[in-house]
Image (cartoon, rainbow, N blue to C red):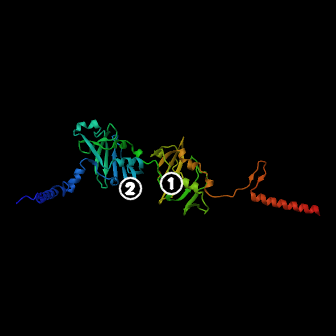
């Protein structure tokens, strides 16, 4: 039979299909291994394999022997040491947290323990960082050595291991801060928009009373005084706003060491704001040159600059409520200057007297 000139492709196509199916079963069906093997392969270069939101606690130890923790509670972070818990500095804590997710090893620098000193990774040189992902045991514990020459990374090793890794982020910078650096210097971080009440007692920068206590509460959108009179909305809102942003310069963890004129354990609260179901309290104790000693509702004592308290110390408290009718003002010659209504009444009375005099003259 003569050739038709057409090529029969059926057999090669069948063979190719069989090869593809076999390859899929051999390699594609399990992605190159079990899910555990795939995860191990993906995480081979990972030093911290946690999402930011999954990190619940950080334990930090410094080469100088200082140890403290950063602890998350709900959506807030706290600095913890010796059983005492303080609000954490959000920006500084956030910088450290941002560096941890997907922290990877960019290169293995050494496997020899004798090389640890070169990277400042001996136990007495390195910072220790334990990262928790919600459990009671850390997900990973790292020793953090010196920064890389370009300051974009640092050298680390896992606790108990000798291998030195060049990490993809510079943890050394964040860990170089002290515990006090991680404490918030804004001890009254409430939301002014949630404020419901304000109590203010005028005091001097020495903590001495200078006026009567005034109370205000939010009625709908307006602040009203305890007696029902309208409050000065702008001044009250400014007090509430600036109190929430009040910053301190120094933590005084042993206030009894201060002179008596700077610290009064019986100081009365000069400012109280209820916001979000919590009452936030400020006490002024006394002054030290340009600083003023203050405390919060828990009794923790700080120093802040006098200028930070200008919003309170220079407040015109008489202007916090509206309004007294203006009284007559003395003129320069000692005569009384009357308002328009009083002047009009006097003019009328004078006109009547003049008219009476004219009538008498006419008679």
Front-lying residue, 169 or 177: 169
Circle 2 is placed at which residue position? 73
Q: Quadrant of the C terminus?
A: bottom right
Residue found 78% across the figure and 57% down from its top: 343
Q: Position of residue 277 (x, y in %)?
A: 47, 60
Q: Which residue lies most toward the right here?
A: 363
Front-lying residue, 86 or 245: 245
Of the numbered discs 2 and 1, the one sitting upstream in the chain is 2
Name the element at disc 1: strand
Name the element at disc 2: strand
Which numbered mark, 2 or 1, is in the foreground of this view?
A: 2
Q: Position of residue 113 (x, y in %)?
A: 23, 39
Q: Report whether residue 207 is seen.
A: no
Which quadrant of the structure image shows residue 33? bottom left
Q: Position of residue 19 (x, y in %)?
A: 13, 56
**Circle 2 residues within 10 Å: few <14, some 14–19, many ≥20:** few
């Amino acid at each position: 039979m003569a050739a038709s000139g057409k090529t029969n492709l059926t057999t090669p196509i069948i063979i190719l299909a069989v090869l593809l199916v076999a390859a899929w079963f051999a390699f594609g069906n399990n992605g190159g291994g079990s899910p555990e093997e795939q995860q191990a392969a993906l995480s081979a270069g990972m030093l911290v394999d946690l999402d930011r939101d999954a990190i619940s606690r950080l334990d930090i130890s410094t080469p100088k022997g200082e140890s403290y923790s950063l602890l998350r509670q709900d959506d807030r972070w706290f600095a913890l040491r010796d059983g005492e818990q303080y609000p954490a500095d959000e920006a500084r804590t956030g910088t450290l947290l941002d560096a941890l997710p997907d922290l990877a090893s960019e290169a293995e620098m050494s496997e020899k323990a004798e090389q640890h000193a070169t990277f400042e990774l001996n136990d007495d040189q390195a910072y220790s960082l334990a990262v928790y992902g919600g459990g009671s045991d850390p997900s990973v514990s790292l020793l953090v050595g010196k920064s890389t020459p370009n300051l974009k990374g640092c050298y680390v090793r896992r606790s108990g291991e000798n291998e030195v890794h060049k990490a993809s982020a510079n943890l050394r910078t964040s860990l170089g801060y002290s515990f006090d650096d991680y404490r918030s210097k804004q001890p009254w971080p409430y939301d002014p928009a949630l404020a419901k009440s304000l109590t203010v007692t005028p005091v001097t920068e020495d903590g001495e009373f200078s006026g009567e206590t005034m109370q205000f509460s939010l009625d709908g959108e307006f602040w009203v005084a305890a007696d029902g009179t309208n409050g000065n909305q702008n001044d009250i809102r400014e007090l509430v706003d600036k109190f929430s942003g009040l910053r301190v310069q120094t933590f005084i963890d042993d206030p009894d060491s201060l002179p008596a004129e700077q610290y009064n354990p019986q100081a009365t609260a000069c400012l109280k704001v209820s916001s979000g179901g919590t009452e936030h309290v400020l006490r002024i104790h006394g002054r030290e040159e340009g600083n003023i000693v203050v405390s919060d509702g828990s009794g923790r004592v700080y120093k802040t600059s006098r200028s930070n308290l200008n919003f309170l110390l220079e407040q015109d408290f008489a202007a916090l409520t509206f309004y007294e009718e203006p009284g007559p003002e003395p003129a320069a010659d000692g005569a009384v200057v009357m308002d328009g209504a009083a002047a009009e009444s006097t003019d009328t009375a004078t006109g009547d007297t003049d008219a009476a005099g004219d009538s008498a003259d006419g008679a």
